[in-house]
Image: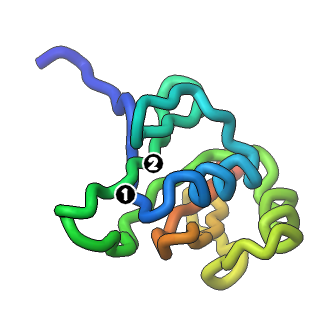
Amino acid sequence: MNPVKIYACWVYVSDLQKSKLFYQSIGFQVKLTDGDWIEFNLGETSFAILRRPPYKGEVRASKTRIMFETEDIELVYAELKDKGVRTVGGIRTEPYGKLLTFEDPDGHWLEFYQRLPPCI
C-alpha cells in the first residue's frame, strides 16, 4: 500500500456562519469556501466544517477528538478564556504532551495539543 496521510477532518455544524466566525475568532484562517463547506488552512491537513443538511436531522455533538497542535498551549488557553470559549477542564499533562479540550458552538469537543520537550 502507498503511504497515506490525512487530507481533512471535518464536523457537521448547525449554523455555518456562526461556526465560521467561532473558528476564525480562535485563529483559524479560511482556506476554501464551497457552498456549505468551509475549510481552514492548518498546513498539510485541513479542518473543515459542513452545514448538516436538514434531511439528515439535527447536529449531534461529537466527543471524538481532533487535535490541533500549538507551540504555546498556555497562551491558547488564555485566549480561549478571554473569548468566552467553553473549555472542558484546564490544561492537562500526559506522557506525550499537554492537552486542552474545548467545545465549539455545536458542542463538539476538540483539543489543542503541545508536544513536550524530549526527555534526556
Instruction: Check disc 2 and report its element: helix, strand or loop.
Output: strand
Reply above or below: 77 against 107: above
x and y percentages locating residue 40 in the rendered image: 56, 36
Instruction: Check disc 1 and report its element: helix, strand or loop.
Output: strand
Residue located 67% across and 77% down the image: 87
Q: Quadrant of residue 111?
A: bottom right
Residue 49's disc is 2
Tell me if I can see residue 4 in this picture. Answer: yes
Q: Earlier in the sequence, mark 2 or mark 1?
A: 1
Residue located 50% across and 53% down the image: 16
x and y percentages locating residue 85 in the rendered image: 72, 72
Between 18 and 89, the residue placed more toward the observer is: 18
Tell me if I can see residue 117 in this picture. Answer: no
Answer whether labels 2 and 1 touch (C-beta < 8 Å). yes
Outermost residue, bottom side: 89
Q: Which residue is labeled 1 in the image?
A: 12
Reply above or below: 82 against 115: below
x and y percentages locating residue 61 in the rendered image: 38, 74
Q: Quadrant of residue 28?
A: top right
Residue located 62% across and 46% down the image: 69
